[in-house]
Amino acid sequence: IPTFQRYMRYAEIATYLQQTAKSYPNLVTLMNAGKTYEGRDMLGLRISTSGGKSRRGIIVDAGIHAREWISPPVAIYLIQQLTEHQSANSALLADLDWYIMPVANPDGYEYTHTRERFWRKNRSTKNSRWCPGTDLNRNFGYHYRESGASDWPCDETYAGPSAFSEIESANIRDWILQCNAAKNVKVYLTFHSYGPMILYPWGYANDIPPADDTAELLAIANEANDAMIKAGSEKFEVQNSAGLYPAAGASDDWSKGVADIPKAYTIELPPGGKNGFDMPANRIVGVVQSVFEGIKVFAAHAKLL
Ligand code: 0X9
Ligand code: ZN
């Protein structure tokens, strides 16, 4: 029983995921993507009505950046809708497999609850004793460190010493590859904040030709944006990632470029609070409900791609 009245701690979220798998054994499979640097389990769910067989799929992750607290609730609300409200959401479950990881950086997430609210990176100290943390969204192995990434451990966008040097990004990589083992995953959504923006690849450079499916990437994002506005959301700005700023080593580019998932988006949720990352808890419900309407649009396309 998740709550959206406040921001849950990681232990509560992990318990919720485990309970959900237990409560819906024919629908939900717990996926353990491995342990974090500090030893937490990185948990995801497969939600599917197909039994074992693979159909078209969609991957959703959240919480790659620790301080972006509004993103895990979006993934958790999605899980709740797909499980507790199966008949209302039967179209989402028909012919589509869901893979959802609500907190992709648990060590960082917990650190933002206990020590430093606006921490962004993971908590690994193996690259520097004095400046812990690598930006997981600069640590993926596609055009690694070519732009917008730092090689100085004290920086917020420190990319680490090499691609996938961090156990968390390696675990996310392996989890995505496992989800997409049958090459059936069509859409990857990674939730961040803050925008509101829907970003589409490529993000590693802006002096390169656009992705060949740019028109389609744009059309789907615009349709999702319309659905969210209709559900009461502010307007999301749909744009090319590198148009915001070029940044290499992010999970979206890797998912499209290496994992072969054709449609990959970084969704920057709306800002809130004093500095944008600390949206008051009383706004969580409004955000997760309207974003759910956007996710439905991505899902509808995933089935057709
Ligand atoms: O800089 C990031 O990692 C993302 N923005 S955030 O404010 N949440 O940190 C944007 C990543 C966009 N994707 C790529 N540049 N590939
Ligand atoms: Zn982020």
Image (cartoon, rainbow, N blue to C red):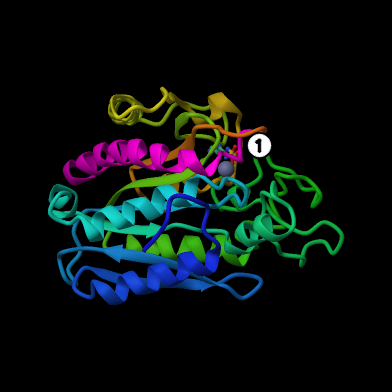
Looking at the rendered image, the quarter that the C terminus falls into is: top left
Q: Is residue 287 above or below residue 66?
A: above
SS category of the residue bearing label 1: loop
Q: Assign the magenta stretch its main secondary structure.
A: helix
| Residue 259 among magenta residues | no
Looking at the rendered image, the quarter that the N terminus falls into is: bottom left
Residue 133 in view here:
yes
Q: Which residue is drawn at the image coordinates 43% and 65% (left, top)?
A: 175
- Region rendered in magenta: 276-305
Circle 1 sits on which residue? Answer: 147
Rendering coords of residue 172 (x, y %)? 49, 61
Q: Is residue 191 above or below residue 3?
A: above
Q: Quadrant of ligand 2?
A: top right
Rendering coords of residue 182 (x, y %)? 26, 62
Q: Is residue 216 above or below residue 53?
A: above
In this picture, residue 140 sits left or right of residue 43: right
| Residue 285 among magenta residues | yes
Residue 122 in view here:
no
Q: Which residue is drawn at the image coordinates 20% and 41% (left, top)?
A: 300
Q: Is residue 79 above or below residue 296?
A: below
